[in-house]
Amino acid sequence: MNTIFFSLDDFDYCLSVAKSRQLNKEKKLVREQAYKPDKNFGLKLHLVGVLGEFAVAKFLNVKLNETIFDGADPGYDLEYLEHKIEVKASLNSNKKSLNLILSKRLHERKSSDLYVFVCVNHDLSAQINGCISWQRFDKEKRIGNFGSGDCYFVSTKSLSDLRVFQQHVLGF
């Protein structure tokens, strides 16, 4: 597990990216807006996601993808030496943080080479809990329902340290 700390400037930057993504979603009236429990729910989801992406980008020393997509996104968040990475982020206080959870639709798109799971903390830090290849996730996945319909998941015990992936890609 790797811990990434955010400066206040990092947080402000991530908040601006999250606000841009949320504004775009609101314009499209996507499904998540139909059942939001409070007016800031969508922004909170985007902020947690962007902080997770930023933590992985910072760890791998790549730039955060700021692209706002009008339709569906390409199914991955970052690229690292031609490897497509999907980052899944959760608040650390969330009980679901013991599992890497993916929608069936996202996994079946086969757009990512690697999934990375990050837990965002309330103290301007994030834990990169690990990563798993698309193929390994596909072999080990189970079906569960965590409140928004059936999805695929694996336990965090199935994840590898992101440094192992990085060393493999770099040929160490």
Image (cartoon, rainbow, N blue to C red):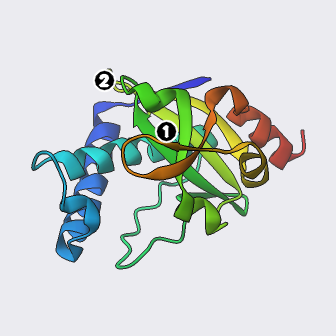
Q: Residues within 10 Å of mark 2 (few under 14, many from 20)?
A: few
Residue that protrudes farthest toward the bottom in the picture: 70
**Image quarter in which the N terminus is found:** top right
Q: Which residue is drawn at the image coordinates 73% and 58% (left, top)?
A: 81
Q: Residues within 10 Å of mark 1 (few under 14, many from 20)?
A: many
Upstream in the sequence, badge 2 or badge 1? 1
Percent from the top left, x then y, of residue 36?
A: 18, 51
**Is 42 displayed left or right of 99 in the figure?**
left
Q: Which residue is drawn at the image coordinates 43% and 74% (left, top)?
A: 72
Q: Quadrant of residue 76?
A: bottom right
Percent from the top left, x then y, of residue 168?
A: 85, 43
Instruction: Name the front one of labels 2 and 1.
Output: 2
Can residue 164 be seen at all in this image of the molecule? yes
Q: Which residue is drawn at the image coordinates 83% and 46% (left, top)?
A: 170
Query: Disc 1 designates what residue?
Result: 55
Dot label at residue 122 = 2
